[in-house]
Image (tube, rainbow, N blue to C red):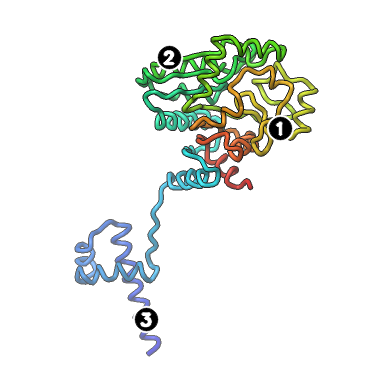
Amino acid sequence: MTSLASTQTRQHIETLIKVAQLYYEDGLNQAQIARQVGFSRSSVSRMLTEAREEGVVHISIGHPLQRLVSMENALKKKYGLKCVRVSASCGDDIDSMLVPQCGAALLMENLKPDSLILTSTGTPMASTVRALPVLDYPHAHVTQMLGSLSPNNPLTDSQDICRMLAEKLGCPYSTLPVPMVVRTAQMAEALRGEDMIASTLALGNRADMAIVGVGAIREGHSGRIFNSFEDAAIARQMERDGVVGHICGHHIDAQGRHVRTSLCDRTISVDFDRFREIPLVIGIVWELWRAKALHACLVGHLMSGLATNCGMAELLLDMP
């Protein structure tokens, strides 16, 4: 009797499997399956329900985008961000195209007709602007966030990026026609008092949005935008004070707090404290060696938006 019951159970399960395969794998409807297996349509319907209830069929709903959306939501929750876009790639060559496209999408989604937008310096910002289509925002305004790099620096300068973005939006712009770092604090103070410089910096302090990168400390140095300005004494101070990176010309520690160096009084940039008040600051970052500096920006609430890749997203979500 037990053997007969066991045989009948096996045959029933085999029938459930066959019906489920015809429905889910071969795409037959219930009427077609009924004709093929010799059961009524209502019996087929009951068998499909039973197959799901007994675990013969496991239904999962998913898409590669689902993982990225989950990461974006997790980053928003962990760091209190307003908007996040994560690209699927985790390789620098592809990310140098895909992450700026994500940044451009965030910029377009948050643009308003009269937005005042700040631009920083460097390759991520230039690539983001190039990824934008030509738009029609004649009442917007683009403003340079910090002074220009030294003439021998190979990075795309903030003045060029400011002009490029204004051309894409079809709007006016204001530049800072001064070096990012000048020789003395007295010279910097005098320049900040010049009408054109003062008005541009004042505009920056009222910005609605900014697009920025983040610099990281590597082997005791701040990277290419400070190449012509740092010396051994500044490097020692940064190490002593726990500097991990910089944003818009301002050095920061692991908690995103401003660390004053001897460069601060010589730097022409939007004020660090006012920078925190900008409603939306979108960071464009994908190189994994910048993760510690990016984390500092996020925990210090120096960014409220982020475009990055899945590798960086994973690192950020694992950090305490």
Front residue (pair 282, 127)? 282
Q: Earlier in the sequence, mark 3 or mark 1?
A: 3
Marks 3 and 1, Cα distance to the nearest angstrom? 72 Å
Q: How many marks?
A: 3
Q: Which residue position is annotated with label 2?
A: 172
Residue at x-position 47% and y-position 44%: 68
Name which residue type carries label 3.
Thr
Q: Residues within 10 Å of mark 2 (few under 14, many from 20)?
A: some
Q: Residues within 10 Å of mark 3 (few under 14, many from 20)?
A: few
Q: Is residue 12 left or right of residue 311?
A: left
Q: Earlier in the sequence, mark 2 or mark 3?
A: 3
Secondary element at tag 1 = strand
Q: Picture coordinates of residue 182 (x, y %)? A: 68, 13
Residue at x-position 62% and y-position 17%: 268
Q: Which residue position is annotated with label 3?
A: 7
Q: Which residue position is annotated with label 1?
A: 243
Q: Picture coordinates of residue 273 (x, y %)? A: 60, 29
Residue at x-position 60% and y-position 20%: 269
Please, is residue 311 above or below residue 36 in the view?
A: above
Q: Quadrant of residue 168?
A: top left
Please, is residue 167 above or below residue 18 in the view?
A: above
Marks 1 and 2, Cα distance to the nearest angstrom? 36 Å
